[in-house]
Image (cartoon, helix red, strand yellow):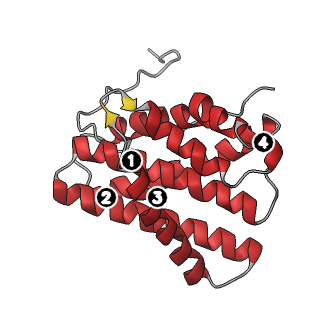
Amino acid sequence: MERSKIRIKSNWFKSGREHGPEELAGAVSFVASRMADNALKNTRKADFEIAVGPQYFAFLTEFLIYAIQVADRIAYRRLSAEDRATFTGILANRIGDTYAENESRLLGGDIRECKHRFIERLNQQADGYADFDYGEDGPSFNFTRYLGYCMDGIMDAKDSGWIIDQMITVEAPDAAETIEKTMRNLLETEPRPARRRSGTSGD
């Protein structure tokens, strides 16, 4: 079955100037949320059962945490220590806000408590991801496999084990590549060449 693909606009409307970690975090949070939704959709298309309800949001939680970890590792390479801390903090909170709003609206519960649980899980999983490498070529095998193991814990028995391969071979690499491209383009300060208009002139 054909996978759904998302189109990401990863350039600033006005280029040629530096953008702070706050702006960068806002842009990446939007991309991460769209990728998590798309990964869930594609995983369902691959015949994995993800029920609407707690399991649905557990999937989104783990994928969003993976996206935050990827973005933080890229920030480690590209930003100062201070800007990285600002970027990752804002990114986590913005993603947490969006996630909590959606969970609270669909499942009920206090929105602040929803966000608290998300951030608590993020902090817990960050310790796990910290054990694995992320280099210039992207995440190591163990880095992506950790996402698979996290997902394995939320799937039904019939999908247990198989989901690890789905994450390692398909969803995790796609997400990391998209975030790498997005952040590389957003951190580019050189002005883009003007587009040539097509069509005929009146001369």
Q: Earlier in the sequence, mark 2 or mark 4?
A: 2
How far apart are the two marked residues, 2 and 4, measured between alpha carbons? 35 Å
Which of the two marks, 1 or 3, is nearer to us in this view?
3
| Labelled disc at residue 125 | 3
Identify which residue, 191 or 95, lies in the foreground: 95
Residue drawn at (75%, 71%), measured in percent from left and top?
A: 106
Q: Which residue is mark 1?
A: 71
Report if the CB atoms under discs 1 and 2 are less than 8 Å apart.
yes
Amino acid marked by disc 4: Asp
> Alpha carbon of mark 4 to alpha carbon of mark 1: how far?
28 Å
Q: Amino acid at mark 2?
A: Phe
> Residue 17 at what x, y percent from top left?
22, 45
Where in the figure is residue 133, as x and y percent of width and height? Answer: 34, 38
Determine which residue is flagged by label 4: 159
Residue mark closest to the camera, 2 vs 4: 4
Against 39, residue 203 (above or below) is above
Instruction: Check residue 30 in the rendering and tell me which mark sits there, or answer none.
Output: none
Label at residue 87: 2
Quick check: marks 2 and 4 in contact, CB under 8 Å? Answer: no
Res 163 seen here: yes
Q: Nearer the viewer, residue 149 or 198?
A: 149
Between discs 3 and 2, the one toward the N terminus = 2
Residue occupying image coordinates x 28% and y 56%: 21
Residue neighbourhood size for the residue with mark 3, other residues' Cα within 10 Å, grouped as few (<14), some (14–19), many (≥20):
some
Which amino acid type is marked by label 1? Ala
The CA span between labels 3 and 2 is 18 Å
Q: Secondary structure at mark 1?
A: helix
**Of the pair 15 and 6, the residue shown nearer to us:** 6
Q: Earlier in the sequence, mark 1 or mark 3?
A: 1
